Amino acid sequence: MASQSLASYDQVPYMANPLPQTHPSRVAAVASMFGLSFVPPKKARVLELGCASGVNLLGMAHFMPEAKFVGVDLSIVQINEAQRRAKELGADNVTYHHMSITDIEPEFGQFDYIICHGVFSWVPPEVQKAIMRICNANMSEEGIAFVSYNVQPGWRLKQIARDAFMGLTPNEMPAIKRHEYGVAWMKDALELTAKEERRPLLHQALAHELEQIITQKDFRYLAHEYLEVNNEPMLFREFLAQANGAGLAYLGDAEPASMIRHLSNPALREFFKNHPASSMAETEQSIDIIMGRTFRQSLLVKGVRHRQINRALTVGLFKDLYIQARIAKKTEQTEQGEQVTYTHARAGKINAQPPYGSAAVEVVAGANVPTEYKRLAVKFAELSKGNEEMFSEALFSMLGAGVIEIFADPYLPELPKGANPLALLDVASGRNLTVNYFGEVIAFDPIQMMVLPLLKGDWVRDEAIAKLEALYAQGTFNVNPAPPNTEQLRTVLGTMIDQAVVVLKAIGIVG
């Protein structure tokens, strides 16, 4: 089975992207929430099990030069790609090893942060045991491990979709062919049954799930999520039992919002008031059922530390943290006067009650990069005349809604002029994604993809316009409406560059 799984990853490399939730500064923030000590991320030792092509670690290594990073993967194709990219970027603080997770022994080294994303559910039991063993034996005393996995009962419907794909396609068929064959078959089957009036409820739900998979997911995701030999979801309490058996304790979830939603959401708070849970494990298991959760990202520490974890979350949790948000502010003139609205990409429109709620949102909306809580609290007091407790309560609600991100000890460098070398490397390789210095995934639009390579080092605006003009003359892109003369063309191109630079600077890609 291992060789078959390995072959599939060599034939269809995993869709590797930066994983913000695994960033040491974000993981450490969860430890801080619960009053637990941690190794400062800026000088930490980080191990990633199943690092694929190294994209996740390379972003961290590039922006955290004093930290050390090690990646391990069984696919030689992906390790070769990881080593090539690291060499091209000149990142000498990250190394990649072509080896099995089961071959890692205590002598391999001690690490302060261990990352295992997208592996645990997709490997046989003996490898799962090895992952848990490594998270204990190779983790420092103040270390934290990140392990993600599919969870039941929410994944049950996806499991039926997996059964459908597995049942359709022969095991011996190559991964790419299995994908092509399965998708073509499913498309025809869905079209055939689309107009059926009497379909069982389960069949309707399954058809919807399959349609989502086919139309919205990359084929690499489909191949590894639905066609792998191993994919065994589990209940949270089953994962907890495995971790405890390996001498590990559950710290929390890598997504803070998932842990406090039942405290900050009035409806959930009332539910748990009427149905009190007897333990943390029961609360977490209940939330999985209520929310239909399909995927977990659990943080583990050494078992001896479980008594040090303070689960009585209070608004004081923010005092040593940094806050960051991507909140868009829009001001409009109406008959009632000036109206300000705030929106978040995931959470949508933010409804904040004046004066304190709206003041808190206004302050946080200005935190495009991780900003010290204490600095934001001072701004809040100046704007609203409210106290720190009021600000913390507003932050608590925003954290539960997923509106803000929290960091501990983030690396916040002064960016030199010009585009970041990692972003340039990603764009040159055809990737439209990169990561900035605080682990935020950045997606480029076509104009940014075209402009970014022109912003190397101590770039000059007129020279950048000339290069863009040459690309225009070659037919690389169009401008609508087409400028009538060269002077107007250069004006339009200059505006394109200026607008791209403003955005790229704001998101930490250009200094």
Image (tube, grey):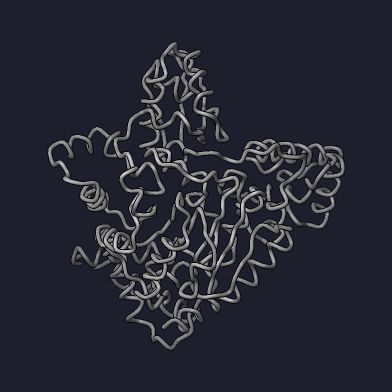
User: Is residue 411 left or right of 399 when viewed as pictured?
Assistant: right
- In the depicted view, which residue is nearer to us: 16 or 96? 96
- Position above or below: 373 against 355: below
Image coordinates of residue 370 in percent, x first then y, are 55, 35
**Which of the image's four quarters has the N terminus?**
bottom left
Can you name the residue that lies furthest to the top here?
385
User: Which quarter of the image is occupied by the C terminus?
Assistant: top right
Image position, residue 275 (x, y; %): 13, 42
Q: Residue at x 22, y 35 (%)?
A: 269
Q: Nearer the viewer, residue 41 or 429?
A: 41
User: Percent position (x, y) of residue 397?
Assistant: 35, 31
Left or right: where does residue 321 sit relative to residue 163?
A: right
Q: Residue at x 38, y 78 (%)?
A: 229
| Depicted 67 relative to depicted 499: above or below | below
- Relative placement, left or right, of 283 versus 216 is left
Residue at screen point 45% across, 36% down:
404
In this view, 170 is above or below 281: below
The residue at the point 47 percent across, 15 percent down is 381
Most extreme residue toward the left is 274
In this rendering, position of residue 176 left or right of residue 93? left
Q: How many marks?
A: 0
Report x, y in % for residue 54.
Answer: 59, 63
Question: Relative to 497, does residue 153 appear above or below in the rendering?
Answer: below
